[in-house]
Amino acid sequence: MRRCLITLLGLLMSVQFAQALRGIEPPLDGPLPEAWRIAIARLAVEGDLGPVDALLAKAKFWQVPDAGYGPPKERRAMRVNKPELCVEDRCLILVLNLEGETAKVELLFFAGDDVLGGDFGATVDGIRAVSLEFSSSGYRTDIRETRLGWFIHTEVIPPRPPRQPRNATEGPPVSIIESLRSMSRGDGHRDR
């Protein structure tokens, strides 16, 4: 009985931990559902985004999790891959909510197409939020839906400094075994 309780407690703790995990969100595969296709065709005309077939051929879509505030929403993030709507490797992204045959635009921003998704582990000022993070070669944009509305944060990612070559006088790397032997001898360095 005690073993069962300990196992159950461990399982419950791991479930709570899993809620805060983030992972790479691949773009949605397969054909776009017909309801979305109709709604985006209408949006393409209204928003002067060009022919719908060309738009859909190049666009990428991600599922946007619903934070659970208000009635359930079916959302997608759509990256518009048109050169005139891109700056370097950041392109226009629309967060769309499907209402009947209409795609309502909830959010517009420029971002890359490497996406990390999370679940309800994230909070903004103590308010539960669902987040997606879009990365590009120099920027990271985090979007979070909260009970108060959308929270958007973009930051510049500084480039990594180039890796310095090893100093020729240092010699080859030392293995852990050699290092432990050296410490046990008390000489503080390895034989050369």
Image (cartoon, grey):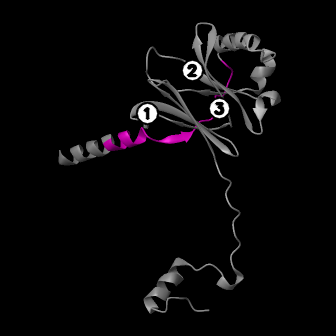
Three-letter code for the amino acid on which mark 3 is drawn: Pro
> Residue 169 lies in what quarter of the image?
bottom right
Nearest the eye: 87 or 29:
87
**Disc 1 target residue:** 120
Helix, strand or loop for disc 1? loop
- Contact, mark 1 vs mark 2 (Cβ under 8 Å): no
Residue range in magenta is 13-32
As drawn, 180 above or below 148: below
Three-letter code for the amino acid on which mark 2 is drawn: Arg
| Mark 2 crowdedness (10 Å alpha carbons): few <14, some 14-19, many ≥20 | many
> Residue 99 lies in what quarter of the image?
top right
Helix, strand or loop for disc 2? strand
**Disc 3 target residue:** 27
Magenta stretch encompasses residue 16: yes
What x and y, as percent, mark residue 174? Answer: 58, 80
Which one is in front in this view, the residue at disc 2 or the one at disc 3? Answer: 2
Considering only order in the chain, which callout, 2 or 1, is on the residue closer to the N terminus? 2
